[in-house]
């Protein structure tokens, strides 16, 4: 088995070099080889060296496909590691870390809206503020809230419903476009009045 695995290694790594990086291919081949050793120790038999070579190639390709699926997003951890940059290379190349998932304009708008929500939430009643803070900030379950503060579930439901409705109204007032008055042409000092011929 060792002779066959060694003989097939360079050939398979070269043939499938377009599928993965060399390090990943070597790792996949090592996994396939270890699987075959375990398989053989359990009592499996191979009819010939050709049979063994085919089994090694099948196991290797199976590991390669698994790794490609992981890097494509099936495994979030593998995908994150694949896109990661080592800290050493950052220091050497002085690369600035940029989060490509974040749109700066969208992030600024979300922060602005969050600030408005925090400001408007102060206009709610103390009970309403308490319910929303526990729901959003602490993510506290209804049963735990009622047990801790001695509320009935009906009171909790009504206060939470009114708090959300009131906050929506306050936010709508905040983002409403003010009614337009006279156009700039009608403002004082900007309009033109022809002089009277008798003046």
Image (spheres, rainbow, N blue to C red):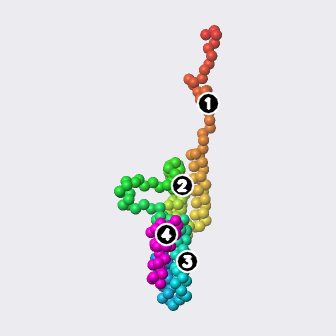
Packing grade of label 1 (10 A; few <14, some 14-19, many >=20) is: few
Q: Secondary structure at mark 2?
A: loop
Asked whether residue 137 is drawn in magenta, I would say no
Q: Is the residue under label 4 in contact with that under label 3 (CB below 8 Å)?
A: no
Q: Is the residue under label 4 in contact with that under label 1 (CB below 8 Å)?
A: no
Pick the residue in front: 191 or 74: 74
Provide the major secondary structure of the magenta segment. Answer: helix
Q: Which residue is mark 2?
A: 125
The magenta region covers 1-27
Q: Which residue is mark 4?
A: 14
Pick the residue in front: 102 or 46: 46
What is the total number of numbered labels drawn onto the structure image? 4
Packing grade of label 2 (10 A; few <14, some 14-19, many >=20) is: few
Identify the mark nearer the N-term, 3 or 4.
Answer: 4
Q: Is the residue under label 1 in contact with that under label 2 (CB below 8 Å)?
A: no
Identify the mark nearer the N-term, 2 or 3.
Answer: 3
From the image, state whether disc 3 or disc 4 is nearer to you. 4
Q: Which residue is mark 3?
A: 58
Instruction: Tell me which corner region of the image, top left, top right, bottom left or bottom right, holds residue 187.
Output: top right
What's the mark number on residue 183?
1
From the image, state whether disc 1 or disc 4 is nearer to you. 4
Against 52, residue 187 (above or below) is above
From the image, state whether disc 2 or disc 4 is nearer to you. 4
């Amino acid at each position: 088995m060792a002779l066959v695995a060694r003989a097939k290694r360079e050939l398979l790594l070269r043939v499938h070099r377009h599928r993965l990086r060399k390090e990943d291919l070597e790792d996949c081949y090592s996994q396939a080889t270890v699987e075959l050793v375990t398989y053989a120790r359990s009592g499996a038999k191979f009819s010939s060296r050709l049979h063994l070579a085919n089994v090694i190639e099948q196991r290797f390709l199976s590991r390669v496909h698994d790794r490609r699926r992981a890097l494509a997003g099936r495994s979030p951890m593998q995908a994150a590691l694949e896109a990661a940059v080592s800290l050493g290379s950052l220091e050497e190349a002085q690369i600035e870390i940029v989060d490509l998932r974040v749109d700066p304009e969208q992030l600024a708008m979300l922060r602005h809206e969050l600030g408005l929500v925090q400001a408007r939430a102060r206009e709610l009643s103390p009970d309403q503020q308490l319910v929303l803070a526990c729901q959003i900030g602490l993510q506290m379950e209804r049963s735990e809230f009622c047990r801790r503060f001695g509320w009935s579930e009906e009171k909790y439901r009504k206060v939470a419903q009114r708090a959300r409705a009131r906050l929506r109204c306050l936010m709508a007032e905040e983002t409403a476009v003010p009614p337009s008055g006279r156009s700039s042409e009608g403002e004082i000092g900007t309009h033109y009045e022809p002089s009277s011929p008798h003046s």
